[in-house]
Image (tube, grey):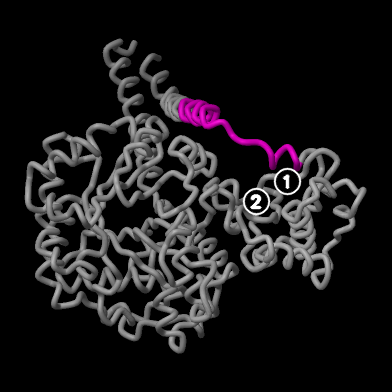
Amino acid sequence: MINSNYLIFLVSLLLILAFTQHHAATSDQTNAPFVGVNIGTDVSNLLPAPDLVNFLKHQKITHIRLYDANPDILRALSGTDIHVTISVPNNQLLAIGSSNATASSWIRKNVAAFRPATRIIAVSVGDEVLTTLPSAAPLLLPALLSLHAALVDSNLHKDVVVSTPHSASIILNPFPPSQAFFNQTLETFILPLLHFLSQTNSPLMLNLYPYYVFMQNKNLVPLDNTLFKTIPASKQMVDPNTLLHYTNLLDAMIDAAYFSMKNLNVSDVVVLVTETGWPSKGDSKEPYATLSNAVTFNSNLIKHVLDRSGTPLHPETTSSVYIYELFNEDLRSPPLSEAYWGLFYGNATPAYLLRVSGVGAFLASDNANQTYCVAGDGVDLKVLQAALDWACGPGRANCSEIQPGESCFQPNNVKNHASYAFDSYYQSQGMSPGSCDFKGVAMITTTDPSRGSCIFPGSRDLSNKTKQVVNTTHSSNAGDRTFRSIEISAIYDILHNYLVAIFPLLLLFVL
């Protein structure tokens, strides 16, 4: 008969193998590329921190980047599992780069005070310092070193990385990517920075905007290539030196960074795209800043990242990205497009609806089965009246329900009537993104505006089942419990499979 101690050893070994396999699977999930969002605060009606965090959870947003270290937001994020990158603003760079004590104090106040309850994963130091604030360039590396040393002292250096975002303009001759190189006048700063990133396993943060590259090179760069649209091989950009085919401009910009690092003999630093996006509105000089292009770019961007297809040079490595940005920042200075990079308005209503079905739960509310077009808040009433007149006239919206005595006549005001007329027109156009604008006085919402006997056009043909789906919000606690039960179930499945496989061998020893 088999020795009992040996049997215990065998079973223990099986347990170790099972948990090792489970840990590897979990680690792979943790290291998967992600799509996050930048949260700017130049918003006149920004949500209070607790409401903002609830909104992030409802939208299934797992990664955010702040342009400061807002303590209210960091406190509200406690216990949520939302991964946070916080930032050292440029105006604090001098103090931190000049004093180790200041850097230590900053880490204690803004990182150690909130971790581990709030999942701060990175500190972004400054913003495009080398190109927008060159006088502070000599302070950049000392600031990174001091902050990293403070993280080491707090035993947080394995959980929180430190890096600095750069403009794409630090890379010259970006196409073809194989000929790209860093601006040689900045190499004295860039090379030591890259060595620091390599030594600390931190990413090269880059703000990459295909929109601006396209605007500056419209005769050379196809719009479809910029928007991630499917294009035939004959229209793809081809690097003549490597013969690599580029189906989209962002991949070419990322590979230009990898080639630039290779020229400096750095090959172990990954690219993290800290900003990218597309504006949904612009002035007369920005004809490509449109709702349709913003929908197409950001929808295809999300799909591209979550497909984990990498780049032509590094198909094994997919860069994570932060979309610029979550909210339209209406307080931004001109040009007009500066106020229209957001996926949502400051009050959390969608600026437009992304087409991201089938790629997971990210931005779940943007995939609602039904959306509506209503009058915006605080808009000019004369413009609103003109838009209402157009919708009920040339727009051929069905405005019969807002006539006197009909179900949607009350309350008898222009905003109520315009909302109904706008939604009628929007639904008649198949909820296409460009059909809910009306010179800026309308907005898309996932909240059904119907009330009492007044049923809006977008609700009229919905079944009760669809209404329940649209109006249901998912409990994050319930989701957590489900995930934990799935995890536990998976572990038991792994153990079961191992034991089933080894059981015949154990019988041989016993017999």
Residue 328: x percent and y percent?
Answer: 49, 58
Residue name at image x 15 percent, y 34 percent: 154
What is the three-letter code of the residue carrying label 1?
Pro
- Give the residue number, with chain letter if any, for mark 2: 445
**Mark 1 falls on what kind of element?**
loop
Residue farthest toward the bottom in the current orientation of the protein: 219
Residue farthest toward the front in the current orientation of the protein: 382
Residue 486: x percent and y percent?
Answer: 51, 30
Which numbered circle lies on residue 449? 1
Choose between 123 and 197: the one closer to the eye.
123
Residue farthest toward the right in the current orientation of the protein: 405
Q: Is residue 418 left or right of residue 276?
A: right
Q: Residues within 10 Å of mark 1 (few under 14, many from 20)?
A: many
**Mark 2 falls on what kind of element?**
strand
Q: Which residues are magenta?
A: 466-489
Q: Quadrant of the C terminus?
A: top left
